[in-house]
Image: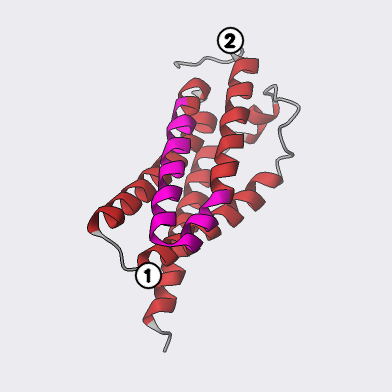
Amino acid sequence: MVPNHKWKLVTSIAIPLIGGTIAGTLATKSAKAKYQNLQTPSFAPPSWVFPVAWTSLYTLMGVAKHQFDKQPKSSNLQTGGNATYTTQLGLNFLWSFLFFRWNLRGTALVDASMLWTAVTLNTYYFYRGSKLAGSLMIPYTGWTTYAVALNYATWKMNRGRHTEYS
């Protein structure tokens, strides 16, 4: 029998991994051709980087959540950590639909900016609850910073090229 804490770790990792995979698959279905036709900035990575980066980040975020949940903490810290974690996951999953599925790159930029704020706050709460949990969120904070810049540059370079309602 697998100990309960191991199941909690598996669940903590599975939620962002499975959620991100489902959101990404549904949002980017038939979007590859559209994305290839976009002008992208010189600092845009090759497309193979994204699944590798997101798999790594979702795994780190799940381990961070597990570490945060293991620590005794005040109810305010618990509430803040869990609220910002849930918020950033929701904004993260929504972004793919905004950017790829609905071609709302300006709206996706607003979402990415809100995501950056939520991830930064989440990293803060996690760090206050567990230094390890907060440290595990730092790569995600960095990637989100990069993603906002990439989203902005792509939006700016392609304004007017596609119908956008943002």
Main structural element of the magenta stretch: helix, strand or loop?
Answer: helix
What's the residue at 36%, 49% (across, down)?
86
Mark 2 secondary-structure assignment: loop
Magenta stretch: residue 133 in it? yes
Task: Please identify the quarter of the rendering in which residue 166 is found.
Answer: top left
Residue closest to the eye, 80 or 102: 80
**Badge 1 density bin: few <14, some 14–19, many ≥20, Cα 10 Å:** some
Question: Residue type at mark 2?
Answer: Gly
Residue at far top of view = 160
The answer to whether residue 93 of the structure is visible from this angle is no
Residue 160, which numbered label? 2
Q: Is residue 67 above or below residue 47?
A: below
Could you tell me which residue is drawn at 48 percent across and 28 percent down?
A: 108
* 125 sits to left or right of 36: left
Give how far across and how far down residue 93 sits, in percent.
45, 43
Q: Which mark is residue 91?
A: none
Q: Position of residue 103 (x, y in %)?
A: 52, 24
**Label located before the other in sequence (1 or 2):** 1
Mark pair 1, 2: CA separation: 49 Å
Mark 1 vs mark 2: give the one in front. 1
The residue at the point 42 percent across, 66 percent down is: 66
Q: Is residue 145 magenta?
A: no
Mark 2 neighbour class, 10 Å CA radius: few under 14, some 14 to 19, many 20 or more = few
The answer to whether residue 149 is seen in the rendering is yes
Point out the stretch of residues depicted in magenta.
110-138
Question: Residue 136 vs residue 36: left or right?
Answer: left
Query: Which numbered circle lies on residue 70?
Result: 1
